[in-house]
Each structure stands twice: as structure tokens, then as C-alpha cells.
Image (cartoon, rainbow, N blue to C red):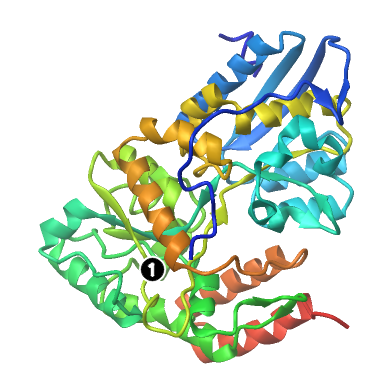
Amino acid sequence: MVSRRQGRTRFAWLGVAAAAVVALAIGGAAFAQDPVTIRFTWWGNPDRDARTNQMVELFMEAYPWITVVTEPTVFDGYFDKLATSAAAGDAPDVITMGGTYPVEYGAAGQLLDLTTVADAVGLGNYDPSSYSSATLGGAVYGLPTGGNARGLLINVDLFEQAGVPLPDDSTWTWQDFVDIAGQLSANLPDGVYGVDWRLDIKEEFAAQRGPEMFLPGGSIGVTAETMADLFQIPLDLMANGGMPSAEQTVELLNTQAERTYFGQGKAAMIFAYSNNVQEFANLLGQRVNIVKIPGEAQYASPGLQVLPSQYFTIYARSKAPEAAALLVNWLLNEPEAAKIILGNRGLSFNPEIAAVIAPFLGEFEAQAAQYLARVANEGRAALFVPSSGKGEVDDLTNLLHEQVLFGITSPADAGEEYVEQASRIIPGPQ
């Protein structure tokens, strides 16, 4: 759609005061204000879509010679569609990415090195640590939309209904987590469970025990024993009734927030990101808290870290890279735009923008900001992310997880197979 036409302290961004400058030049040189059209894609939901389109409307008012065609979509199938359009040489000019996609696409020559448009995108507003996972060989392929951290979301109303005390996240263990999930299921109505189980916390789980999932230099670090213990948890949860059946779990593993058991009010806990707190609170109309995952005090080191929520990137074949750079800068560094998106894509790593939005955060976004500050102070430095192969390893992990859920393989065998196959996918230095 065309918006206008259709009407421990590691991160300085945790609180300082305001302003952002919109660059009008690329590499210090002014460019012609000839009419140009660019495309911008992201994944989300109706709330994020509405906020982002409003930001784009303001951008087009400020830059009337630039028309932005927005292409929002849901997460399911987003990267498959992107891969197809990139292969055809027809990807959008500004692309939202996550995880290791910026370096994977950048290494393939599909993304613009943002150091070539550093002034225009506002690269200097960010500490290099905030975009390190989008950096390869000195090239920067994405700027973070904001920071978040994984945690455990809790439906406080369901805990109270079940008569189960909220966990003490400064001391609780993984066994405590399994026990609490079972207690919740036992005390809640049929069809309502203790936890909507996800494997999303596998890297944090590995980091707690050590070695980490991926080692610097690009090899697999996690042991088969650690993976076996992780694969055992859902079996324990199914045994005590703390989570839905294997069939129910697999059916909704990769789905929109509103379709999850937690999002339907049918589960009291779910692993998610800090920027999901407000989203689920809005969906449920109930009180949602975020707490640290189990095991943070159980082992020698914490597993939680502050992560870039998403990245804005620019397609290498864009015919209007200057306009695309201006849009990225506006989305990330313009105070009026920041007041619209707030913490929806994570809390800004730009300290001035973080200060701008702080007074406007709602109850649950403020709670997420407080949680993020805790993780920044009590968590660990960023875990290493390999420049390639992580997506394939994630697919392998999910496949083995599913086989364990259905009893096709044992946790111990799945752990061994994970390390063997993952080490082939990411063999490390040769």
C-alpha cells in the first residue's frame, strides 16, 4: 500500500535526554530531490502496521518527493517470500530483518553496506556493540530497531485463579518451572495449561550451563548432555500435565500471538521477548508480567542477554539508496516517529530516542523497559552468532524437538544427533 495516498551496565541507551537529526545528504553530499518511489516491508500485526504506516505518513510529509509503498505482512512465510523476491532481483528497498539474516544476506551481496551511507542513516547514533551481529568484515548491513531480551511472560490473573504464587525469578530452577507448570494445569479449568512450551530459549539454556551454543570462531559449543536435558523438559511437562499434548504444541509452534495458547488465555506462561508484553496484555485484557527465565541463578553464568529486536536494512540493488537511507534514519532517529512506535520493536539503542519515548510508555511497555534494564545489568554480554548456518541449525533443533515430543527419539539420542549434525553445518575454522 502507499501510505500517503491511502490516507554490568553495558548499554548507554537505558535513559538519557533527547533529540535526533535527520540527515539530508549521503556521505556529506546533497542529492537531487527528484520524485522517487521506494518500497518498505516488515512483519507484524494490525497494531504495528498502523503505527508504522503513521510513521511513514510523517516521513512523506517531510520528504514530499519520496513516495513510500508499504508492504506489511505476517511473520509466517515472511522470509520465504523475501528470499524469492531477492533471488528475482526485486526485493523491497528497505527490508526488516532479524537474527542472522543481515549478515547472511549481506555476505551474499544482497544488502547495502550502511557505512557507505553512514550520515544519512544516523550510524553515529549507535554504539557498534548494538549492531555487531549485523556486521561482517567491517561492513554494517543493518541498524537495530531497538533492544529486547527473552524472558518468561506470566498471566498474573491465571496464577491467581490457580492459587499458585508467582515464581521468584532470582532463585528458581528449571525443576521449579516444571513443577509450577504442573500445579497451574492441575488447578485451572480443563484445556488451560501451565505453559505454552517453546524451544526459543535454547541458546540461553546452553549459555547458563556452558559452553555456549555457538563459540567465537564459528563452531558448535553446546554439549550433547545439555541438549538432552533441554529436550527432556517438555517430556516432563507433558508427564505432569503442565503443557498441551505433542500434537497441540507442534500445531501452534510457529503462529501469530493471538493464536498461541497464551494469547488465547489458555496457558499461564510462555517464553517470549520483552517487547511482547504490551502486545499480549492488549490481546488478553489481563495482567501480564515478564520474569527472568529459570536457571539464571542455578548455574555459574546467566544466559539472558540484551538483543537487537529487529534490523532495518537496505537492498543492495535499490535504485534509490539515498531515499531508502533517509527512511531508515527517520524510522530510527526521528523523535516524532519514535513517539508513535514507542517500544513496539524494542527499546531504542539511540540514547536520545530512548529518552524521548520514556515518558510515553504505557504500563506494560514500562514494565518491559524495567526488565530490559535488569537484564542489561545482571545478564551477560552478547552471545556469539555465526555468520551463516544458524538458520539450518535452528531447523535441525526444531526437527529433533518434534521427534522427541512424539517419542520417535529419546532426549539423549536427540542431543547426540544435534551435536553431530550441527557440527557438520557449522564446522568452525578449518
Q: Amino acid at mark 1?
A: Ile
**Residue 108 visible in image:** yes
Image position, residue 225 (x, y; %): 53, 91
Residue placed most toward the observer, 358 or 93: 358
Question: What is the quadrant of the C terminus in the image?
Answer: bottom right
- When asked about the image quadrant of residue 137, the answer is bottom right
For this rendering, which residue is in front, 325 or 254?
A: 325
> Across the whole image, how many numbered discs are drawn on residues?
1
Q: Is residue 429 left or right of residue 381?
A: right
Residue at x 56%, y 49% (from the top left corner): 309
User: Is residue 217 positioned above or below 251 on the image?
Assistant: below
178 relative position to 144: left or right: left
The residue shown at (36%, 68%) is 245
Residue at image position (84%, 29%) is: 321
Work out whether 106 lies above or below 231.
Answer: above
Q: Is residue 44 in view?
A: no
Percent coordinates x, y for residue 379 in the rendering: 47, 67
Give the residue at mark 1: 293
Q: Quadrant of the N terminus?
A: top right
Who is closer to the viewer here, 51 or 333? 333
| Residue 56 sits above or below residue 83 on the image | above
Residue at the front extreme, as displayed: 17
Q: Splitting the image into 4 quarters, where does residue 66 fall? A: top right
Badge 1 element: loop
Q: Position of residue 374 (x, y in %)?
A: 39, 60
- Answer above or below: position of 276 versus 181: above
Left or right of 212 in this view: 79? right
Q: Quadrant of residue 55?
A: top right
Q: Nearer the viewer, residue 177 or 416?
A: 177
Residue density around tag 1, few if under 14, some if 14–19, many if 20 or more, within 10 Å: many
Please provide percent x and percent y for residue 336: 53, 22
